[in-house]
Image: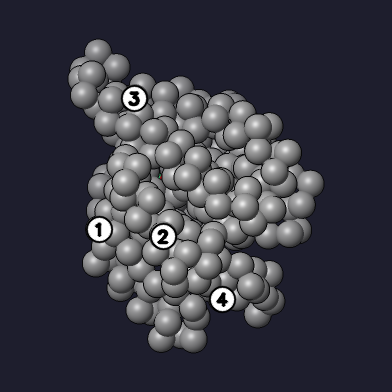
Amino acid sequence: MTQRLAGKTAIVTGSGTGIGAATATLFANEGARVVLADLDEASAQAVCADIVAGGGKAAACHVDIRDADRIETMLAFARERFGPAHILVNNAGMGAQKHFLETPLETLRAMLDTNVVGTFLCAQAAARDMVELGGGRIVNVASHSGFLGSSGRAAYAAAKGGVIAMTRVMAVDLAQHNIAVNAVAPGPIDVPRSRSQHTEERRTAWHRAVPLGRYGEPREVAAVILFLASDEASYVTGQTYPVDGGFTAAGLRVKQI
Ligand SMILES: NC(=O)c1ccc[n+]([C@@H]2O[C@H](COP(=O)([O-])OP(=O)(O)OC[C@H]3O[C@@H](n4cnc5c(N)ncnc54)[C@H](O)[C@@H]3O)[C@@H](O)[C@H]2O)c1
């Protein structure tokens, strides 16, 4: 195993499950000291215990990314345990699926609050530590829904589109501090939530719509996040990388051409 993040402190939000858990685990395997933070602290503790049992350096804490005070507590925890964070992965998020005409205002507000306000608050607070450190990396987790008009996604798409737009501006404003900001836009990923919530019909529709013909694995998203968090991406900032098996690249697809 390479040690691409040796000597770095990394915070991964929403790391109790799915893409966040895979990212935290990969980062620890690459030598990072990882803080796992989640609204569901028990799940973050469980992933943390696995990492530590495997010889990695990790610690877990509670965070609610909608709450500036809880974010300050998370950053203080990171500083105390491992030193200030060089890397932040804004992975915590939530989705919603409702026809536009039936989407309540509260759903839109909840999507914006977690996905946009949460990303903004975590990045702003962590970037202040990175300025002191002389640089850093922020990777935001957006979605294919920030690019395309998938049905029933008005509230979620507005939020993830906001994350993509904010990624560009954060990158421009933070460049003078040697802080790179990028994002990934996953397609359908085989996480516990999608395994339990997606019907057979929906899974089949995804298999047809994705040129690679399958859901992605959390580790396949984590691999791109690792690249963006590593020194290998030293001249990359302000970009959003689809990790979607070709979904956003495809238009009309006729079978077996
Ligand atoms: N799985 C997919 O198919 C997919 C596709 C595109 C984008 N995404 C995005 O990837 C990210 C991770 O999603 P996932 O599917 O791997 O996991 P998930 O959606 O099942 O879990 C998200 C994690 O974030 C945590 N969380 C939610 N709200 C929080 C808050 N306010 N404060 C702190 N933690 C909070 C949850 O407790 C959970 O552990 C999300 O931003 C999601 O929108 C996922």
Q: Amino acid at mark 3?
A: Ala
Residue topped by disc 2: 76
Residue 155 is labelled as 3
Q: Residue at x 57, y 57 (%)?
A: 87
Label 1 residue near ligand 1, CB within 8 Å: yes
Local crowd size for mark 1, using a 10 Å CA cut-off: few (<14), some (14–19), many (≥20)? some
Which residue sits at x=41%, y=29%? 159
Tell me the amino acid under the disc marked 1: Asp
Q: Quadrant of the N terminus?
A: bottom right
Asked if marks 4 and 2 touch (Cβ < 8 Å), the reply is no
Task: Relative to 165, say whether 184 is above or below.
Answer: below
For marks 2 and 1, the one nearer the N-term is 1
Q: Which residue carries the number 1 mark?
A: 40
Name the secondary structure under disc 2.
Answer: helix
Residue 244 in the image: x percent, y percent?
A: 55, 44
In this rendering, which labeled residue sits more in front, label 2 or label 3? 2
Choose mark 3 or mark 4, whichever is in front. 4
Task: Label 3: state its secondary structure.
Answer: helix
- The location of residue 256, given as percent across then percent down, is 61, 40
Q: Nearer the viewer, residue 186 or 199?
A: 186
Q: Nearer the viewer, mark 3 or mark 1?
A: 1
